[in-house]
Amino acid sequence: MARAASTYVCQACGAIASKWSGRCDACGAWNAIVEEAAPAAGGLVAARAEPIGFVPLDAPGDSLTRQVIGIAELDRVVGGGLIPGSAVLVGGDPGIGKSTLMLQAAGSLARNGYATAYVTGEEAVEQVRLRARRLGLAEAPVHLAAATAVREIVASLDRPDAPAVVVIDSIQTMYLDSLESAPGTVAQVRATAQELIRLGKRRGITFILVGHVTKDGQIAGPRVLEHMVDTVLYFEGERSHQFRIMRAVKNRFGPVDEIGVFTMTDTGLAEVANPSALFLGRREGMVDGIAVFAGMEGTRPLLAEIQALVTGAPQGSPRRAVVGWDAGRLAMLLAVLEARCGLAFGGHDVYLNVVGGLRITEPAADLAVAAALISSLTGVGVPEKTVVFGEVGLTGEVRPVAQAAARLREAAKLGFSRAFLPAADHDRGGALELTALPRIQDLVPLLGTGAGPRRVQRRP
């Protein structure tokens, strides 16, 4: 018998190679190329295809009503509820709480009147029931099944009375028996997801697919998987912290970069109604090296505490350590402070941390990071009840940021009375006392010696 043909596929990016090699030429990943059986010939049917029908864009049709999950933070992230027939991909580190949150979501949907099914490929049914009892969901009308064969799952769901929402935990454990490759490979993940998504579009079933992540934090499997689904959610957090953040990075039916904040408890994941208070440290008096950043996560204003420690480098080789912010942006900001403000960081170790395990990506945090660095270097604390935000350019100018009014309203609501901000945003403070900073040089006198820049007083 002739040997079955095979191909070599990169498990990181899905690129196909003619032979095995240690490094993928497409993405550069090492030891990611795996031999897989080639698809059988004759996959395309030679019979004549039926033409498709086109309809005008304004043709009348059924309006889609969102399926409200009942967990406010999760509903916020997906845009107000799930769209029938959509596919949602949820990724996160092992043990972060993906299965717990998805079981809570399934129980809440079932209690809201939506027929819900939970299909697990990693646990037995009794194990899921045990976790449901711990979460207080033992009486929730959720249909459970332990299965990994997609052909059997599709046969069970392809009926007129199919569930409205189906959770698949996880997509990497599913397999199609028509493919010879093992579950979790590029071919299997791509094919199984396509079968489930096709069924969801045909029957109007909302599929929530739980996905594993790689050591780099990316969802395991081919990148095309994220293109196939309608919504991609990342569940983030440190195991040492009780806080968890659900972040939307793709959403065809709602805003992206929206976040939901949860805290891990003995009875599952609980919503955090006021995340700004959660990420702010509790301290009395002025402490050097600390600045409060007024940021935006999607449509939500969020205050976070940024801590910096600048200390002498004993061996003459300064170290830079960053947690929760971009290390490259820190290097750029240190260069600006040295070139434009005359501050010497070259002989110091610099440590930067965002409190609570939060990760900040927007450039509006530049000014807050600079304030924390200068404060730690000079030993002068940022004034109490002060928030800081603004983007810093390479020439030292402090550039305006989006939604400054919303940031200041959140700060006022939490009891802050003063703000350091770009000069272009100085008229949006309401009751706050605003300190306009046209240049990064104007921040140094406020945290050292000398006269500060102009202040603009706003009263209610």
Image (cartoon, rainbow, N blue to C red):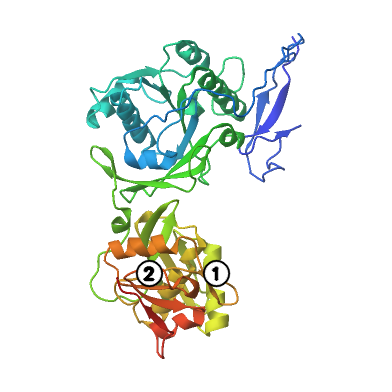
Query: Given the image, on which type of amino acid does mark 2 rest?
Result: Gly
Disc 1 crowd rating (10 Å Cα; few below 14, some 14-19, many 20+) is: few
Image height of 89 relative to 127, above or below: below
Number of residue marks: 2
Q: Is residue 16 left or right of residue 460?
A: right
Q: Nearer the viewer, residue 82 or 153?
A: 82
- The x, y position of residue 102, in whole percent, is 37, 32
Q: In this rendering, which labeled residue sits more in front, label 1 or label 2?
A: 2
Task: Look at mark 2 in the image and give the residue it sits on.
Answer: 429
Q: Secondary structure at mark 1?
A: helix
User: Which secondary structure, mark 2?
Assistant: loop
Which one is earlier in the sequence, the residue at label 1 or at label 2?
1
Residue 312 appearing in the image? no
Residue 380 percent coordinates (x, y)? 35, 82
- Residue corresponding to mark 1: 331
In x, y percent, where is residue 218? 53, 43
Q: Which mark is residue 422?
A: none
Judging depth in this view, the residue of 88 and 135 nearest the camera is 88
Assess whether mark 2 and mark 1 are in contact (beta carbons under 8 angstroms). no
Looking at the rendered structure, the kind of residue marked 1 is Ala
